[in-house]
Image (tube, rainbow, N blue to C red):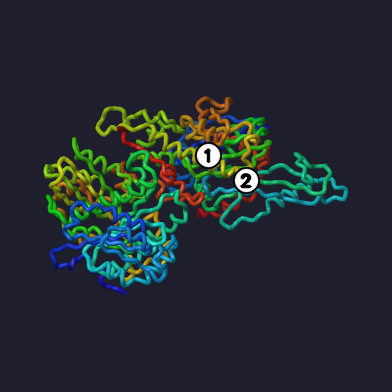
């Protein structure tokens, strides 16, 4: 098997040009990449968009520059029809073409909708191929609505377990939860677009951090340091505001971000990447304020990587993007790139928090760290104590109990989420 | 002869531990001489997760009640709940043995034994065998003794639980050097005190919504025909609010108690409620609709599950549940819960406000299970429902415990 992926923490790209490829996999993934509005990175040549699908016709409509139809020999270009086995065969048949498309990148962002035939099956194979390169691989994966049925849900859960082991950071976007954003009368069709918008925010923030110069510059090696291990759990949240007291409002928006309030959210994040994008009027004092608030809020013990970017086209506005990594399974290196032998042993819920992560290979420290140091006077304090320190850390209350299955639904998950009932909490 | 014994009724609930001390004098009656409610730690969805934390809470509550009564407990009656409890309906059949086709005692026993003979997987234990009516040649009879017929049948609703979980709760009690005389599932205990005999005859559904579970028992023609546990309770409502409103558990709990309603009303859209209401920093306004929609979804689901389970057992027939629903348990305090029952179960509902023959301070829905336990301690299993106890169960479970 490959051994190259172990040198990830030492970026070997010597050219100045950073190469990022965003790959949409399957129908939903392609749609998301298609709709991706890349603020102003499109023209720079740093960011390339690509799409992989089994359905030639769907791909033909895509505006993405680089397209790959896989498994023509299996499906005659007609799609996988929701059959995961067909999707798998299709991807296996065209492994070489996938490898060519993946190429040699610094950062690969996979975008996939899980639950169907192509995305669920092909994403892990693309991830496997990408794992053999030097690239840092992140994946945004949308999970089907509960009301789409238990079959799609099972497929999605299995694939997410498999995919998680293969990429450096997997960001699950459960549609049930995303529905909570946006207007009250969001229809399901709009809800799919909501997921795409979230992906767009995450992708843009990552690209901005890497490609724009700012108050606090972060490069690919800082991102690598956060996502240095494969597997584990990634959390993702964004908040934005403009006008008025936009700093407080953006923080508020971030703190009520539904993705940060999922039932299975880990109590303790091991490493956090925070990027803020502000206008020309964003003062360094405000940036410090945001940073110290966030490091307190997320209880991250050691490693917070902060980036702050100025976008000349904005003013009086702030966008915050948080990516955190937790619960890295210490699997032996030889097995890391191999697909999970049995996806069912990697359940969606119940992550195995392992606080004793090796502390010796610390990443580059952020530029501003005086405030951070203050907020963690006692780094030896153990995990249980942290849970009591901050009441706001909404750990899934039923996390450690047996799953509460009834008719294939987990009753511990809020009913309103399973039923797709939208709750509007902002009073205005 | 007026020998007295002190019985402790213990309910290890998800949110609280309830202990009642009753003094039973001969066969005459029972005086409640002490009580205590303590917070419960280490119990989720009615099941003990953390044995030592739960033990500490239970022991503290027992000692407090004993101090309150200035008396020591002789024996404990223990409530059981949790999703591991399941039931099945078994019918025992026997051919009347004598040549004159007159039913004798031996035939009755034969039919009963036949109904109870179904073996459980090794990790499960029977908790109750609850007798249902006899049938003689297909005709229901109350007492078949000395009646004429060829084939005698009897139905039993049998409740069983996971041995490990049941013995965990016994272990907690034994940890303070007390013996468990009997175990009764929460729903049956509550039902015993909540309903009049006439209500049991006309059909009634008792729903006990606690912190971590919702227990129900259905009476029809005076018999317990079905019990069930939905492992969802007030904790879930709080958790839903906490996730949906993105609040800490404490604030969510306060919202639930302060502003919660079991059903959503479109007028709630225009009502705003304050998080703290004290003009402090961080105080926020929330639309009442957000709160009531979240609770409505959860509470409706609980009732929908009960309805579905009754329908699956072919027992959901409003005409047979003429006395409607009687609600109890801590979460029955939720405003508008009766209306939610009406909407979701199509049955009239009332919230139990305590039996009149107990002190005012015990007339709280949180006490009904413990009161029911005392009721069983007094009447034994010779109640009208003839809930027969598998004799060996306690001995069997005790055998699993190793204290040496």
Residue B361 is situated, as x and y percent measured from the top left of the image, at: 50, 27
User: Alpha-carbon distance for marks 2 and 1?
Assistant: 15 Å
Q: Residues within 10 Å of mark 1 (few under 14, many from 20)?
A: many
Nearer to us in this view, B143 or A39: A39
From this view, report whether residue B305 is shown above or below residue B375: below
Judge from the rendering whether residue A369 lies leftward or rightward of residue B311; answer left or right: left
Nearer to us in this view, B365 or B60: B365
Residue at screen point 31% across, 36% down:
A426
Is residue A211 in sight in this rendering?
yes
- Mark number, residue B118: none
Is there CB contact under 8 Å for labels 2 and 1? no
From this view, report whether residue B165 is shown above or below residue B368: below
Location of residue B42 (image quadrant): top left
Quadrant housing the N terminus of chain A? bottom left
Q: Which residue is identified by label 2?
A: B313
- Mark number, residue B303: 1
Secondary structure of the residue carrying tag 1 is: helix
From this view, report whether residue A47 is shown above or below residue B136: below
Residue B383 is situated, as x and y percent measured from the top left of the image, at: 67, 37
Number of numbered discs on residues: 2
Judge from the rendering whether residue B379 lies leftward or rightward of residue B62; answer left or right: right
* Subunit ID for the residue under disc 2: B
* Subunit ID for the residue under disc 1: B
């Amino acid at each position: 098997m490959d051994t190259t992926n172990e040198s990830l923490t030492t970026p070997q790209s010597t050219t100045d040009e950073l190469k990022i490829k965003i790959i949409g996999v399957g129908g939903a993934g392609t749609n998301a990449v298609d709709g991706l509005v890349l603020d102003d990175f499109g023209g720079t040549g740093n960011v390339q968009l690509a799409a992989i699908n089994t359905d030639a016709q769907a791909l033909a409509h895509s505006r993405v520059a680089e397209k790959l139809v896989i498994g023509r020999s299996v499906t005659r270009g007609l799609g996988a029809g929701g059959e995961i086995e067909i999707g798998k065969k299709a991807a296996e048949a065209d492994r070489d073409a996938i490898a060519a498309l993946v190429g040699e990148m610094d950062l690969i962002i996979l975008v996939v909708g899980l639950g169907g035939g192509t995305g669920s099956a092909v994403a892990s194979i693309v991830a496997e191929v990408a794992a053999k390169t030097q690239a840092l691989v992140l994946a945004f994966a949308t999970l089907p609505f509960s009301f789409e049925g238990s079959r799609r849900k099972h497929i999605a859960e299995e694939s997410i377990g498999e995919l998680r082991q293969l990429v450096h950071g997997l960001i699950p976007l459960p549609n049930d939860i995303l529905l909570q954003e946006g207007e009250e009368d969001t229809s399901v069709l709009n809800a799919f677009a909501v997921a795409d918008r979230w992906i767009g925010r995450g992708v843009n923030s990552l690209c901005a951090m890497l490609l724009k110069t700012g108050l606090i510059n972060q490069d690919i090696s800082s991102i690598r340091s956060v996502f240095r291990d494969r597997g584990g759990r990634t959390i993702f949240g964004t908040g934005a505001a403009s006008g008025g007291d936009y700093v407080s409002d953006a923080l508020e928006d971030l703190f009520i971000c539904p993705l940060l309030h999922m039932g299975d959210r880990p109590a303790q994040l091991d490493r956090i990447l925070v990027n803020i994008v502000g206008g020309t009027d964003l003062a360094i004092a405000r940036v410090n304020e945001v940073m110290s608030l966030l490091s307190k809020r997320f209880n991250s013990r050691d490693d917070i990587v902060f980036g702050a970017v100025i976008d000349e086209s904005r003013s009086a506005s702030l966008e915050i993007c948080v990516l955190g990594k937790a619960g890295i399974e210490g699997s032996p290196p030889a097995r890391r790139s191999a697909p999970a032998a049995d996806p069912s042993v990697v359940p969606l819920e119940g992550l195995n928090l392992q606080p004793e992560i090796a502390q010796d290979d610390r990443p580059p420290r952020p530029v501003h760290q005086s405030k951070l140091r203050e907020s963690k006077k006692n780094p030896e304090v153990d995990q249980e104590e942290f849970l009591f320190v901050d009441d706001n850390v909404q750990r899934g209350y039923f996390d450690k109990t047996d799953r509460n299955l009834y008719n294939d639904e987990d009753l511990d998950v809020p009913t309103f989420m399973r039923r797709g009932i939208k709750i509007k909490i902002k009073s205005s | 002869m007026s020998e007295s014994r002190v019985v402790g009724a213990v309910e290890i609930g998800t949110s609280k531990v309830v202990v009642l001390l009753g003094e039973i004098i001969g066969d005459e009656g029972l005086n409640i001489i002490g009580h205590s409610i303590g917070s419960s730690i280490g119990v989720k969805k009615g099941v003990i997760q953390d044995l030592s934390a739960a033990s500490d809470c239970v022991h503290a509550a027992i000692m407090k009640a004993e101090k309150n009564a200035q008396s020591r407990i002789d024996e404990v009656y223990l409530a059981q709940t949790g999703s591991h409890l399941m039931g099945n309906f078994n019918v025992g059949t026997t051919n009347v043995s004598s040549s004159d086709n007159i039913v004798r005692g031996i035939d009755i026993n034969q039919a009963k034994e036949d109904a109870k003979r179904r073996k459980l997987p090794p990790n499960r234990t029977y908790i109750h065998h609850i007798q249902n009516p006899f049938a003689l040649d297909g005709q229901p009879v109350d007492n078949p003794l000395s009646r004429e017929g060829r084939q005698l049948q009897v139905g039993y609703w049998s409740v069983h639980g996971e041995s490990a979980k049941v013995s965990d709760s016994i272990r907690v009690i034994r940890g303070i050097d007390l013996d468990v005389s009997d175990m009764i599932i929460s729903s049956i205990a509550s039902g015993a005190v909540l309903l009049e005999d006439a209500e049991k005859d006309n059909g009634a559904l008792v729903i006990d919504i606690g912190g971590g579970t919702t227990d129900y028992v259905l009476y029809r023609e005076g018999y317990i025909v079905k019990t069930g546990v939905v492992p969802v309770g007030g904790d879930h409502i709080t958790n839903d609010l906490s996730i949906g409103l993105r609040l800490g558990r404490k604030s969510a709990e306060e919202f639930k108690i302060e502003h919660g309603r079991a059903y959503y009303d479109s007028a709630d859209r225009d009502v705003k409620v304050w998080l703290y209401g004290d003009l402090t920093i961080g105080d926020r306004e929330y639309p009442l609709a957000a709160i009531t929609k979240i609770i409505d979804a959860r509470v409706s689901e609980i009732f929908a599950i009960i309805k579905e389970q009754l329908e699956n057992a072919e027992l959901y027939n409003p005409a047979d549940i003429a006395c409607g629903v009687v609600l109890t348990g801590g979460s029955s305090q939720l405003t508008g819960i009766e209306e939610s029952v009406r909407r979701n179960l199509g049955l009239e509902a009332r919230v139990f406000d305590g039996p009149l023959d107990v002190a005012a301070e015990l007339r709280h829905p949180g006490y009904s299970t413990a009161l029911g336990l005392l009721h069983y301690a007094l009447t034994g299993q010779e109640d009208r429902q003839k809930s027969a106890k598998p004799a060996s169960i306690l001995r069997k479970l005790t055998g699993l415990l190793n204290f040496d």
